[in-house]
């Protein structure tokens, strides 16, 4: 099997790449190393096995065409993307070019040169909008979405808001439409919060890793002032460790007769949901520290709650997460410790 990963030097991409190398399959990586940490991940991957690397840009049709024509992959993991809401608001044109134009470049080149390939697309919970129509209950540590005790399933109406929501949502829908119109074998994953090793978290993306780093700075007396959070800290996401995401991807492509042309909400589920405040409590217990922070205003277009109802994924390709939120956070502490 020939596997191509766009954005293969990113967090999820490098984890997937390592798994493909472990399985002894043929690997091709396309990444322009734009994102912080991707150059380090490329060097790390070179220690894991042999693969062909293309320093190509998903925005450039000729770049994408060259790769697809040459490789003719069996499976494409499309992970190249602009992943930060804040960046999309600061530079909506860049967000559009990477997420929408880049996604269409990949679909068109696959349609022309590798029409039998399986394509998985890393979409986002932001395709569902800000949930301003949902009633929320506020508790001491979190918000709860009334009427959604098991989280949100795929029947939720799409509601693109913010440049990021529009760009991820556009390619989400293009992926599904190319399955209907052209018979491409596409699968869309609408992700909640993914975290794990090889993730170089920033204030804009990778919140679990970012706050783990703040906790370790406090533990090691490196924190010179309180860190900041946006909003009340009661925002809730279900968190999913990278190893579980990889098993999700491979299970889905292994059941492509069922999964082709479908979208799945993917996350840790309600039992692995955490608010920021609850993550802080967990880190305080684990590290025997006090998380001292300052509150900033809410970020624009921030969801109070997103928890994926993963019943459809379980039904269609027998997938459920294996790593609990606590075990995952402990693994993340180990990764951050080893990377500083």
Image (cartoon, rainbow, N blue to C red):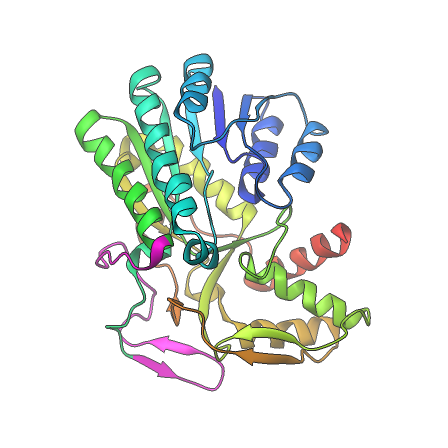
Q: Is residue 248 left or right of residue 158?
A: right
How many discs mark residues in the rendered view? 0
**Could you tell me residue 254's position as x and y percent?**
39, 31
* Residue nearest the viewer, comparing 162 with 139: 162
The quarter of the picture where residue 76 lies is top left
Q: Is residue 296 above or below residue 16?
A: below
The quarter of the picture where residue 126 lies is bottom left
Q: Main secondary structure of the magenta part?
A: loop
Whether residue 117 is visible = yes
**Is-magenta flag for residue 158?**
yes
Q: Residue furthest bottom?
A: 140
**Could you tell me residue 86's position as x and y percent?**
47, 59
Instruction: Give the magenta range.
Output: 136-163
**Is-magenta flag for residue 50?**
no
Q: Is residue 8 above or below residue 28?
A: below
Residue occupying image coordinates x 60% and y 64% = 326
**Could you tell me residue 218's position as x and y percent?**
75, 72
Q: Is residue 336 left or right of residue 130?
A: right
Residue occupying image coordinates x 30% and y 25% = 108
Q: Is residue 126 left or right of residue 140?
A: left
The quarter of the image holding the C terminus is bottom right
Residue occupying image coordinates x 54% and y 32% = 31
Whether residue 310 is visible = no
Q: Residue furthest top?
A: 70
Q: Residue furthest right?
A: 221
**Could you tell me residue 287's position as x and y percent?**
74, 71
Residue occupying image coordinates x 69% and y 63% = 213
């Amino acid at each position: 099997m020939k596997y191509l990963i766009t954005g293969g030097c990113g967090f999820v991409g490098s984890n997937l790449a390592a798994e493909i190398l472990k399985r002894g399959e043929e690997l091709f990586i396309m990444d322009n190393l734009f994102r912080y940490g991707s150059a380090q991940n490329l060097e790390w991957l070179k220690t894991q096995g042999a693969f062909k690397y293309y320093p190509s840009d998903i925005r450039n049709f000729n770049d994408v065409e060259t790769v697809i024509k040459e490789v003719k992959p069996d499976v494409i993991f499309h992970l190249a993307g602009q992943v930060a809401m804040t960046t999309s608001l600061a530079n909506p044109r860049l967000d559009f070019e990477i997420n929408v134009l880049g996604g269409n470049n990949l679909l068109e080149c696959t349609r022309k040169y590798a029409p039998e390939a399986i394509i998985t697309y890393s979409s986002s919970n932001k395709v569902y909008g800000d949930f301003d129509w949902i009633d929320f209950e506020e508790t001491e540590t979190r918000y709860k979405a009334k009427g959604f005790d098991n989280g949100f399933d795929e029947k939720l109406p799409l509601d693109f808001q913010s440049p990021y929501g529009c760009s991820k949502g556009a390619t989400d829908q293009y992926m599904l439409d190319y399955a209907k119109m052209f018979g491409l074998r596409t699968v869309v994953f609408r992700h909640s919060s993914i975290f794990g090793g090889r993730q170089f978290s920033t204030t804009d993306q990778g919140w679990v890793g970012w706050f783990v780093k703040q906790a370790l700075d406090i533990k090691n007396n490196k924190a010179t002032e309180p860190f900041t959070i946006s909003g009340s800290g009661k925002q809730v996401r279900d968190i999913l460790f990278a190893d579980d995401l990889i098993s999700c991807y491979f299970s889905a492509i292994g059941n492509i007769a069922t999964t082709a042309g479908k979208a799945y909400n993917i996350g840790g589920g309600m039992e692995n949901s955490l608010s920021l405040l609850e993550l802080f409590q967990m880190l305080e217990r684990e590290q025997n520290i006090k998380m001292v922070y300052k509150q900033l205003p809410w970020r624009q277009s921030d969801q109070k709650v997103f928890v994926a109802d993963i019943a459809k994924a379980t039904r269609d390709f027998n997938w459920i997460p294996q790593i609990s939120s606590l075990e995952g956070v402990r693994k993340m502490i180990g990764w951050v410790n080893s990377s500083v």
